[in-house]
Amino acid sequence: MVRIYIGIILFFVAATTQAQSIKKLKRMKTAFIQNASVDRLGNFFLEFSDGQIKKYDPDGKMMARLKTQNLPTLLEPWFHPKIFAYYQKDMRIVNYNRMFEVSDDFKLDASIAIEPTLVCPTNDNRFLVLDEADLSIKKFENNQNRVLNEFKIDTTHWNKHFQFSFMREYLHLIFLLDKNQGIIIVNELGKTMKHLPVKVENFGFFGEELFYLLGNKIIFFDLYSGNTRELTLAAGKFGIVTDERIFIVNEKEVVVYQFNPDKPDDKE
């Protein structure tokens, strides 16, 4: 009986290992990387210190390039085929097409927010703006220049030194990345649903899981159960996971892995 149990355990371990097999495909040397992101098709984007943004296919072949004077405060290519960019200094929202040609370019109206630190798109083609003046989030519609909904974030248990760098709506929740606080998940009323006090440079989503790179580990956090799992790879600054690839990004290097997981359902 013991042998049967051991056999069953080994079978499931082997099945799990096979389902998440990882193979290093290539190593790319680059210029100094400031940020990294990915779209729904698995194309990844690198932002460089010289103002360039480059789009690559899942195998690392460059597909498009944009040269700017200043990098965007927030780049969001997730809502394919648009590439969303917010430039805080000029309060500009720019939508690029897949080849980085401008399709929309407008200035955020000053009546929307006093100190609009971050702006990101929503699934219903509106925008969220983080107003750091009163730590509120406002959902607005640009065509009619009106705020549809707003709420203050509950910061009762937070460190008061904020350095927000990213925001995204996902599964009817709002995710904030702060360099001091970590990853903060709030609902549409501003209540903090979960706080992950991890110092990371980026995060993303893999079905119902939130992922981030911590040292040499990709951590997957299940948004429904709260369970975590991890994959150990090379250490990096940014981590990106798709259903075919894992990208580990350092300041001047990208390592591309082939990834064959059991694909989770995308609930959006």
Image: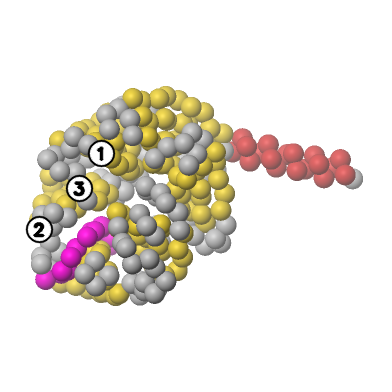
Q: Is residue 7 left or right of residue 202?
A: right
Contact (Cβ within 8 Å) of mark 2 with mark 3: no
Residue 176: give x, y in percent of width and height.
35, 60
Cα distance between the residues tagged 2 and 1: 22 Å
Is residue 56 shown above or below 26?
below
Please tell me how crowded label 1 is: few (under 14), some (14-19), or many (20+) other residues with Cα within 10 Å. Answer: many
Residue 52: give x, y in percent of width and height.
19, 35
Residue 224: give x, y in percent of width and height.
52, 62
- Considering the numbered disc 3 on the image, is that residue within a helix, a strand or a loop? loop
Q: Amino acid at mark 1?
A: Glu
Please state the extent of the stretch shown in magenta in the rendering: 111-126
Numbered disc in front, either 2 or 1 = 1
Q: Is residue 218 visible?
A: yes
Contact (Cβ within 8 Å) of mark 1 with mark 3: yes
Secondary structure mostly seen in magenta is loop
Residue 95 in magenta stretch: no
Cα distance between the residues tagged 1 and 3: 9 Å
In-front residue for pair 142/30 = 30
Q: Disc 2 marks which residue?
A: 107
Is residue 138 shown above or below 266?
below
Q: Disc 3 marks which residue?
A: 72
Is residue 83 shown above or below 221?
above
- Considering the numbered disc 2 on the image, is that residue within a helix, a strand or a loop? strand
Residue 47 is labelled as 1
